Image: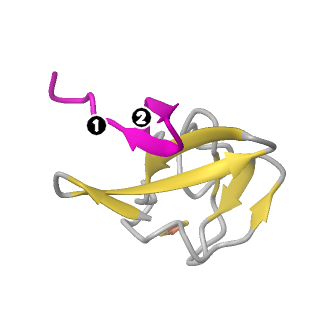
Amino acid sequence: MVDVEGAQVAVFNLEGHYYAIEDVCTHDGGMLTGGPIEGDQIVCPRHGARFSIRTGQALTPPAFEPTAAFPVRLIDGEIQVRDDRWD
Ligand code: FES
């Protein structure tokens, strides 16, 4: 998890591909990191909602709204993430 200009962003490496989503569960604002990762999903440790690591989509209740997904790139071994919501 990293702080990107005030946004808590969780970065994942799934089989060599990097993904970044906001580390906030849309059910009740809990942090997603710390929950189990199953395939390309992360399970909120508080009430069990599942989110797609690739897209941020909420996959199961009690969350219904997606969490933000951010563009990621790898440049000279450095992982770069950008919060593009306010562009
Ligand atoms: S805070 Fe994540 S499922 Fe409730």
Location of residue 72 with respect to 32 vertically, above or below: above
Residue drawn at x 44%, y 70% is: 31
**Residue 32 appears left or right of 14:** left
Q: Which of the 4 quarters of the picture holds residue 38?
A: bottom right
Q: Residue 69 placed where, x, y %?
A: 45, 36
The residue under label 1 is: 83
Q: State the SS at label 2.
A: strand
Q: Residue 56 placed where, x, y %?
A: 54, 40
Residue closer to the observer: 50 or 14: 14
State yes or no: residue 82 in magenta.
yes
Count the marks: 2
Q: Which mark is residue 6?
A: none
Residue drawn at x 52%, y 53% is: 11
Q: Residue 72 placed where, x, y %?
A: 47, 34
> In the rendered view of the protein, which quadrant contains the N terminus?
bottom left
Stretch of the chain drawn in magenta:
68-87
Location of residue 73 with respect to 61 vertically, above or below: above
Residue closer to the observer: 62 or 83: 83
- Amino acid at dot 2: Phe
State yes or no: residue 34 in magenta.
no
Whether pointer 1 and pointer 2 mark residues with C-beta atoms closer than 8 Å, the reply is yes
Q: State the SS at label 1.
A: loop
Q: Which mark is residue 70?
A: 2
Q: Is residue 85 visible?
A: yes
Dot 1, crowdedness within 10 Å: few (<14), some or many (≥20)?
Answer: some
Dot 2, crowdedness within 10 Å: few (<14), some or many (≥20)?
Answer: many
> In the rendered view of the protein, which quadrant contains the C terminus?
top left
Residue extending farthest to the front is: 76
